[in-house]
Amino acid sequence: MDRPHHFNKYVYRYGLMVVIASLVSLYSFCALSSPKASADESTSYVRVIHASPFVGTADVFVDGKPFLNGFRFASVTDYAALPAGNHKVQIALVGKGIGAAALTKTLPVQAGEAYTIAAVGASPQTLNLQVFVDDNRVVANYSKVRIYHLIPDAGTITVSIGEDTTIKDMAYQDNSDYVTVDSGPCTFAFTMPSSNEKMTLPRTLAANTVTSVFAVGMLHGNPKAQLVAATTQGIPGLPQTGSDPNAMPAPTSIPASPIWLLAMALLGLLGLGITRHFRRSA
């Protein structure tokens, strides 16, 4: 039995395995340490709320194509992806078609931004699309809240969010700053100083979410004033991604240690040297 020959054969195979393992490990480290591609930078995100007492149920068209059908008063859509740029938005009474649009407006949207577009106005002369720029970033484990005043005949309003009473003298078609609050039960209280009327909305706020509360309708007319809440998932602690309401937290990158990379490279070279030596000896 030729023991040296078998030994050489064993060492050769071992060296070959070391080379392969080193290459695989090196590739894995490089893949993990590479930054992940960011979300599509040409996309914006848009949601729509129907807050016009004048229009009633409507159809909405964007760039000449149906976008929303049978859109009822006080309805809020989820966010929808929309290419950045200028878009022609038209609103028509339900079933009347785009040719009978009561409102036509061109709206610019920027890449990476999120928007709330509100159909507002209590008469043909005041019918309009009000655009709000949203920010869905949140502080981890907290909730964030924003108020939108869309009641035409309410005058200025004051809003309390639980114990927070910082929102005062909001004008029609205005929005509040974002307020960060603890998650859990919360009551929104809207007061109209001009008429001493008050509306409340109890709500349970989940952590890492953004809740929008819209005051819509008419205090002295129809449809009646009401509070409508919409909640979207926030993105905790990740600047540059909060504008995408549907974004998931980016995977954590693992930096490749220079020492580990050097060690794997040397191990690979060692294995390659062993392999070449015993191939010549075989």
Image: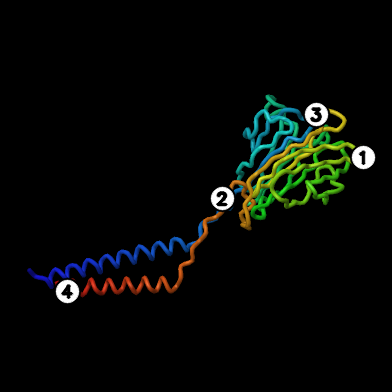
Q: Which residue is mark 2?
A: 248
- x then y, percent, for residue 76: 69, 37
Question: Which tag, 3 or 4, sits closer to the chain's start?
Answer: 3
Q: Residues within 10 Å of mark 1 (few under 14, many from 20)?
A: few
Q: Which residue is mark 4?
A: 280
Q: Which residue: 31% across, 73% down?
A: 269
**Which element carries disc 4, helix, strand or loop?**
helix
- x then y, percent, for residue 59: 68, 30
The reply to whether residue 148 is visible in this rendering is yes
**Which element carries disc 2, helix, strand or loop?**
loop
Q: Amino acid at mark 3?
A: Pro
Q: Amino acid at mark 2?
A: Met
Q: Quadrant of the C terminus?
A: bottom left
Q: CA distance from mark 1 to mark 4?
A: 97 Å
Please tell me whether mark 1 or mark 3 is closer to you in this view. Answer: 1
Q: Which residue is mark 1?
A: 194
Q: CA distance from mark 1 to mark 3?
A: 20 Å
Q: Residues within 10 Å of mark 3 (few under 14, many from 20)?
A: some
In this picture, residue 84 sits left or right of residue 34: right
Q: Amino acid at mark 1?
A: Ser
When the figure is inspected, residue 111 is found, relative to residue 73, above or below; the finding is below
Question: Which tag, 1 or 4, sits closer to the chain's start?
Answer: 1
Q: Quadrant of residue 106?
A: top right
Please tell me whether mark 2 or mark 3 is closer to you in this view. Answer: 2
Q: Which residue is mark 3?
A: 223
